Image: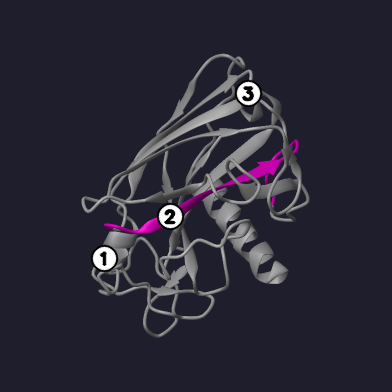
Amino acid sequence: MRLALNIYIRLFTLALILTGSAVPPAAADTPIRNNKIINVPLFVRDGAGKPLTAQSDPATPVYESRTLAPILAPDRHQLTLAEFNAPRGFVIARCGKKGTETVIRLTGLVPNGVYTMWLLTFRSPGFDPTFANLIGLGAIGSRGGTQNVVQASPAGTAELTVTAKAGALSMFGNLTDCWVADEYEVHVVGAYHIDGVTHGATPGPDGSFVEQFGFIF
């Protein structure tokens, strides 16, 4: 399980660095809006197990990369690459007396799909391929993974407001009260739960979820 999660983090963060740029930090009491969503295809494959790229047919049915399980919507149809890459949205983060309030608004999600949101933190100088600078990974909000859950509407929209307090993250590492200003680099990651079930402090077993999008701060 830990090896699979390490691979997932390495690949996801590499994809973010290659395809997007971080939103710069601001003063602790200044809200930061990040609308640079990154749709990540590294964790999906075609029916033959081959990676999908920007040049792939958008109508290609997608499979989860670790187990090659089909990625199904709640209505049991298999998602296409176009559907997988559809999410859009933004994150607003602002520090307060009780922690970092984070507002996440999304469209283009899997209709009625179950999602969880995660934080990855990096020390200076930020992400690199050796992964030496990763210092934290966990559910945004409560350590038990009860506040990072959101279900998309029938139209594929969702909104989550959660406050991340200082302390231990659900998987490893610690978080400051104001990650917007104090952490060197943070990735806010959205995972779609193929099984329609959340798994608390971790995203879940291989094949039960897939990393779909993220934002870099």
Q: Residues within 10 Å of mark 1 (few under 14, many from 20)?
A: some
Q: Is residue 81 above or below residue 156?
A: below
Contact, mark 1 vs mark 3 (Cβ under 8 Å): no
Q: Quadrant of residue 81?
A: bottom left
Residue at (75%, 38%) from the top-left corner? 123
Amino acid bearing label 2: Tyr
The percent position of residue 51, horizontal first and vertical second, equals 45, 73
Q: 74 left or right of 188? A: left
Residue at (44%, 78%) from the top-left corner? 50
Element under disc 2: strand
Contact, mark 2 vs mark 1 (Cβ under 8 Å): no
On whether residue 122 falls in the magenta region, the answer is: yes
> Between 79 and 201, which is closer to the camera in this rendering?
201
> Which of the numbered marks, if any, corresponds to residue 58?
1
Residue at (65%, 32%) from the top-left corner? 165
The quadrant of the image that shows the C terminus is top right
Which marked residue is nearer to the observer: mark 1 or mark 3?
A: 3
The percent position of residue 74, horizontal first and vertical second, equals 30, 67
Q: Residues within 10 Å of mark 2 (few under 14, many from 20)?
A: many
Amino acid bearing label 1: Pro
Q: Earlier in the sequence, mark 1 or mark 3?
A: 1
Q: Which residue is mark 2?
A: 115
> Between 168 and 59, which is closer to the camera in this rendering?
168
Q: Is residue 173 above or below residue 63?
A: above
> Which of the numbered marks, if any, corresponds to residue 141?
none
Q: Residues within 10 Å of mark 3 (few under 14, many from 20)?
A: few
Q: Quadrant of residue 141?
A: top right
Q: Which residue is mark 3?
A: 98
